[in-house]
Image: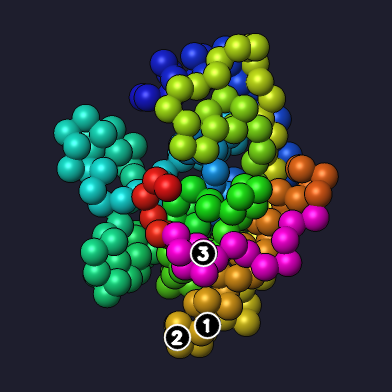
Amino acid sequence: MLAAPVIPIFSLFIKLDLEGEEHLPEEGAFVLAPNHYSELDPLAVAIAVYHLGRAPRFLAKESLFRNKAIGWAFRSTGMVPVARSSSSRAAKQTIEAAERLATNGQGIIVYPEGSLTRDPDMWPMRGKTGAVRLALAGDIPLIPMAHWGVQAVLPRYGKKPSLWPLRKRVRLVIGPEVDLSAYRGVPATPEVLANATDAVMHDIADLLGGLRGQTPPAERWNPAAHGQAETGRL
């Protein structure tokens, strides 16, 4: 419903180049994990997923659902709220969401970084465990994704988009399913979740390195080590 007016307008300003389409399942549940460096990222990712014939649903902050307009749009398109106020509550919501996805054969997009990357060079930073919790709880494939070029339209923390010249190129690549076999069927301890998340972030960073023609840092940026908050705008 929302795609009809949004996609033609978006296409006037941005040209999407997508690689690795074969890695996104044509049917059945999946968790798609992209990098995140611009507040325009979700739109580019959603349109790419929509073009592949899958409904773009996101795991979104629960607070966003309290806004009447945004909440209506999110609910009508199947977005899944997640709580940040309580780790046990968020974990329970994640498991419930995984069960619904597995039962209904739906996909969901989760930003494992949880916020725009704090890395000065916009490489993926340290990830949070939400994406792997979903994948492990529901035995769902976790698919890494990277994109580059959105920052030319809306820079990180930018408030005004740059719309000229038209049709700026945004490249996206979907990678093979992350190998989480070592973490399935074992207790989801903090160490297991952290190691599984590291594997996801490694694959995302490698995909982004291919798009940028650069080698990603060996270690992910850790906001806490630099006195930065891990959520919200810097």
Seen from the viewer's position, the closer of residues 165 and 62 is 165
* Residue under the image location 58 percent in, 78 percent down: 195
Seen from the viewer's position, the closer of residues 142 and 25 is 142
Q: Does the magenta portion include 194?
A: no
Question: Which residue position holds label 1?
Answer: 192
Q: Measured along the vertical axis of the image, is residue 183 above or below residue 67?
A: below
Seen from the viewer's position, the closer of residues 234 and 67 is 234
Q: Measured along the vertical axis of the image, is residue 7 above or below residue 201?
A: above
Question: Which residue position holds label 3?
Answer: 226
Q: Residue furthest front?
A: 227
Residue 5 location, quadrant: top left
Q: Is residue 89 visible?
A: yes
Seen from the viewer's position, the closer of residues 17 and 128 is 128
Instruction: Give the SS element for disc 1.
Output: helix
Quadrant of the rendering where the N terminus is positioned = top left
Q: Check disc 3 and give the amino acid type.
A: His
Left or right: 147 in relation to 87? right
Q: Check disc 2 and give the amino acid type.
A: Thr
Circles 1 and 2: CB atoms closer than 8 Å: yes
* Residue under the image location 50 percent in, 77 percent down: 193
* Residue under the image location 34 percent in, 45 percent down: 79
Tell me which segment is drawn in magenta: 215-228
Question: Which residue position holds label 2?
Answer: 189
